[in-house]
Image (cartoon, helix red, strand yellow):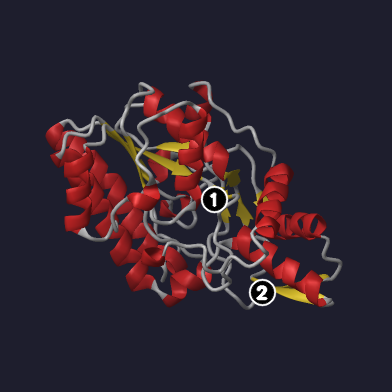
Amino acid sequence: MENSAKVYVADNDGLVGSAILSELEREGFQGALLRDHGPCLTDSEEVDDFFARHRPTHVFLVGGITGGIRGNQLYPAILMRDNLLVNCHVIESAHRHGVQKLLYLASSCIYPKFAAQPMKVEYLTSGKLEPTNEPYALAKLAGLFLCQAYRKQFGSRFVTAIPANVFGPGDHFDLEDSHVIAALIRRMHEAKCGGAPAIEIWGSGRPRREFIFSQDVARACLFLMDAYDGDEPINIGVGCDWSIQEIAEMIRDIVGFTGELIFDGSKADGMPAKLLESDRLAQMGWQARTPIRAGLSMTYDWFLQHGGDVEGNRDERAVL
């Protein structure tokens, strides 16, 4: 991308989109179209009108709504429907209005539940998905195949990346549908402030997850927009994973909560492990910069700076 490129970050959700916008600004891009001034991504007329008026040259499609295990169990239809709508509207409008290149960000939950570790792109569709997030995963998987279909039929330069579990400043800390790191930060902070002797954590604590800081994902997205133009999706990871218990213990230390962590093994664990094979990206010359503890500390600092209560920080159009 030239610095004069007209870049649209299609995201009504916040975490990755905000990080990409910050990175674009840091890199001197003057033509970024602010996410907050964009259309409701589930409305086809709004999306197409936006593309017709602004004519972006490059699009980062990182929008759609997400949720943790509880959110996926409570709202499977909304998660699947809205993500399908977002993918269809943005990808079609990008094609119709001549976007030079689009990068679509999928999710590591699109891999089979029992995929061998680390997960390679050839493992996609080779087995059953994790039942607790299957509707969401199918919608994200459909976006990947839609990009490939537009490449095949129209020659569109639409590429797909699959990030590890993303966390960082600007995350959603509402307890009902936040992801694990944000939920643990909020719960431990509130437990510390309330003097609670212990907190209960959903699941056994044994599942392993690969986590990546949002600013690292943003850097990877800009790197891939410049350096990658393949039909196959490409993984974005850090090359190592941690158990949920290990992450919880790190967060307890950073937050300063001195109580006990009680894991409730009767609750769903989700996928047993999610570690991405990211050798291809590393061979291209990219690697993450942010160690896990540093990222967790920056995320907690952001949470504190925003009052320790950011339940309403999400765009209302993306609320479940």
Look at the picture and state if 13 lies above or below 292: below
Look at the picture and state if 278 lies above or below 164: above
Q: Count up the numbered dots.
A: 2
Q: Which mark is residue 165?
A: 1
Is residue 243 visible to us here?
Answer: no
Occupied quadrant, residue 174: bottom right
Viewer-side label of 2, 1: 1
**Residue at 73% in and 45% down:** 293
Callouts 2 and 1 close, C-beta under 8 Å? no
Query: Residue 281's x, y, as percent?
Result: 49, 28
State the residue position of label 2: 265
Q: Which amino acid, mark 2? A: Gly
Query: Residue 252's x, y, as percent?
Result: 78, 60
Mark toward the start of the polypeptide (2 vs 1): 1
On screen, residue 161 versus residue 45, left or right, reads: right
In the rendered image, the quadrant that contains the N terminus is top left
Query: Residue 51's x, y, as percent?
Result: 21, 44
In the rendered image, the quadrant that contains the C terminus is bottom left
Look at the picture and state if 8 lies above or below 6: below
On screen, residue 278 versus residue 52, left or right, reads: right
**Residue at 42% in and 68% down:** 319
Query: Residue 116's x, y, as percent?
Result: 51, 47
**Residue at 53% in and 46% down:** 164
For disc 1, the neighbor class at 10 Å (few under 14, some 14 to 19, many from 20) is many
Look at the picture and state if 159 lies above or below 12: above
**Residue at 69% in and 50% down:** 296
Q: Secondary structure at mark 1?
A: strand
Q: Which amino acid, mark 1? A: Asn
Q: CA distance from mark 2 to mark 1?
A: 22 Å
On screen, residue 207 versus residue 59, left or right, reads: right
